[in-house]
Amino acid sequence: MIGTVSAPLDGVAAPGIAIGASPRIEQAHLSTGQTVAAFVVFLVLATIGLIVPIALYLLRPETSAATLERWRAWLLRNQRAAGAVLLLVIGFSLAMRGVQGLLE
């Protein structure tokens, strides 16, 4: 099950995510240590949806199957609402960037 979840992200997502975040982090003019910390925090937050199920599987293998099945069932029941919220957040973020760009 874990291989199925992580297969699309193996070796591609983390570098791609870091490359996508780099222009915004560079614009902040941080020190080297702060830049590294920003990348690490960004990568952890961006991959938390992958990290948590894998950690659960590794740390609690006896109960992870039932827990992951409950999470899966919840997501299937609420996929439209979850998708709508995600699109609203992305849309709001893009709108705010646009407004900020107009005001600068």
Image (cartoon, grey):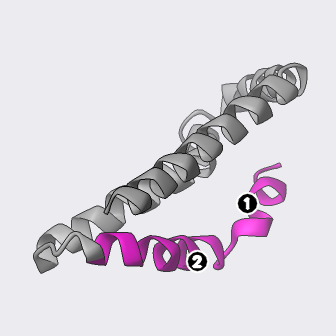
Q: Which residue is mark 2?
A: 16
Q: Which portion, as a residue range, is magenta?
A: 1-26
The spot of residue 24 in percent (x, y) is 37, 70
Query: Local crowd at mark 1 within 10 Å, few (<14), some, or many (≥20)?
Result: some
Q: Residue at x 59, y 37 (%)?
A: 56
Residue depth check, mark 1 versus mark 2: number of the one nearer the observer: 2
The spot of residue 84 in percent (x, y) is 77, 31
Q: Residue at x 10, y 76 (%)?
A: 31
The spot of residue 62 in percent (x, y) is 68, 29
Does 18 sit left or right of 25 as displayed? right
Q: Is residue 20 magenta?
A: yes
Quadrant occupied by the C terminus:
bottom left
From this viewpoint, which residue is outermost toward the front?
Answer: 103
**Which sits in the foreground, 94 or 48?**
94
Task: State the separation of the CA atoms marked 1 and 2.
Answer: 15 Å
The vertical placement of 6 against 57, above or below, is below
Q: Which residue is mark 1?
A: 6
Q: Amino acid at mark 1?
A: Ser
* Label drawn at residue 39: none
First in sequence: mark 1 or mark 2?
1
Does 103 sit left or right of 66 as displayed? left
Does 14 sit left or right of 75 as displayed? left
The spot of residue 89 in percent (x, y) is 60, 38
Does 32 sit left or right of 55 as displayed? left
